[in-house]
Amino acid sequence: MEFQLLFTAFQAQPAHARWSQQRQLHECLRQGIRSGTLASGARLPASRALAAELGVARNSVLYAYEQLASEGFLVASRRGSVVAPLAGRLAAKAPRHDTPAPRASLSRRAQNMPLLPGSETAAAFAPGVPALGDFPVLRWRRMLDRAWASLTPAQLNYADPAGEPALREAIAGHLRVARGALVEAGQVFITDGTQSSLDLCARAFADAGDKVWVENPGYQGAVAAFRAAQLKAVGIVVDGDGMAPTASDWLRQRPRLIYTTPSHQYPVGSVLSLARRLALIDGARQAGALVIEDDYDSEFRHDGPPLACMQGLAFDAPVVYLGTFSKTLFPALRIGFMVVPTALAPALALLLDRAAPRGRTAEQRALAEFIVGGQFALHLRRMRRLYRQRRDALVAALGEQLGDMASVHGGSAGMHLALRLHDGAADDVALSARLMAQHGIMAPALSLHAVGLRAQPWRGFLLGYAQVPVEAMEPLVIKLAGVVRG
């Protein structure tokens, strides 16, 4: 074996130029063994001889030999350092160039997940993105510093899987006042956000093959979570008063779970009427089902006070309430929560204790202080004023530029609205792609939110306005209108 040629060729590769001599020699010999260039049973030169041949320090050779021996590539014997038999098998398993290697792929279940729009959070009109530049970062940092300073060494271990007790108490107190919830801290469970909560609901409260009702059009992240748990998603039509199941749905599509966004339906923004909320609770009780109330955007109601949540409409309501701080504060916080019926809380706590160790104690303590100290309520009031101004500017610009071609839906609350095109055959997917390519405008197509093969999709766009300044609204809408009319 011409070791000098082998080593020189390895050193000449640009990727190895800045490596130390020790590492270069070790990786060179390792690569030779893995590829079969150094065959099983081959004896390597003595360390002094190889060092002299390559012009390197003997210590570099000793390091390479010792490292390869510890990894199982070399065996020390009376003959010296010998390539291990196991290493020879690595080369034997290498695929032949004329035989295509089998490709690894996702499971069929994963491949059938619905596709979600890209998270181009810096793009104009990206939905679900709050006004990040208006978050009180310095105040939050001081609270986070105090939380870290208060931790004991023991609190650096895994935390309570249900969440930091102080944060659970703070959330329960906030929900009782702001959302009319009937809740105690023991019913609150901290999660990594709404998607994490949905995954947990799908696994904890239903079995494979069970049916789950989802609004149509609806949130595709929920559909993905339910399909991942092998549940059957059934699309229930949404109208101006929200989710509208029929008597036939209750009879023929009996659900185990019912997923709804009653305060600001995603994506079209309708509000579930009180009559339908009560009917949904009664129907779920009779069917032995659970309602998953995703209280999306409930904190930002622009045309009146926030509506009370479904969970608080009845003492024993079969409702699991989901909330998140990703929209009210900032997405990178990754803290959400669930409120479960009292009867289910002990069993869920036991499940989480077995399967979901928690951490991030400092962040949860800082958030508890943020809520209890009144900073959360103050931030919400500021954001409501800001978002209402931006909503008004967007609605006015859309009416002026596209009033004859589209209608606005869901502008009474939240951080986004739906622009529904009058042309029911419009290719909103192609238009959405063109807006991003030509103008950097992210306007997800409404048709992508259809649920079920027989669903009649809405045609239009989902427009988030929370992060778009008022003065930028009209120029952006003019660009959007140009693409739509073109």
Image (cartoon, rainbow, N blue to C red):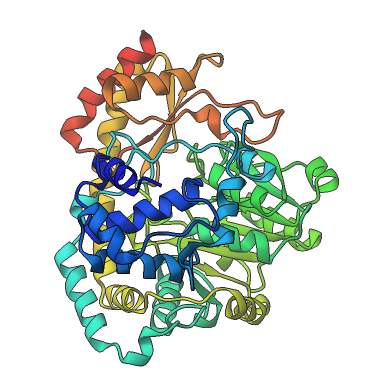
Residue depicted at x 65% and y 39%: 112
| Residue 309 x, y percent position in the rendering | 52, 61
Q: Position of residue 233 (x, y in %)?
A: 70, 45
Quadrant of the rendered image containing residue 103: top right
User: 7 or 123, which is in the foreground?
Assistant: 7
Q: Is residue 402 above or below residue 394?
A: above
Taking the image as shown, residue 332 lies to the left or right of residue 311, namely left
**Residue 279: image x %, image y %?**
69, 54
Q: Nearer the viewer, residue 65 or 303?
A: 65
Image coords of residue 224 (percent x, y): 60, 46
Q: Which of the 4 quarters of the picture holds residue 58?
A: bottom left
Evaluate whether residue 277 shows in this view.
Answer: yes
Quarter of the image holding residue 152?
bottom left
Residue 327 in view, yes or no: no
Residue located farthest toward the top when viewing the structure as drawn: 486
**Which sits in the foreground, 451 or 71?**
71
Q: Is residue 427 above or below residue 453?
A: above
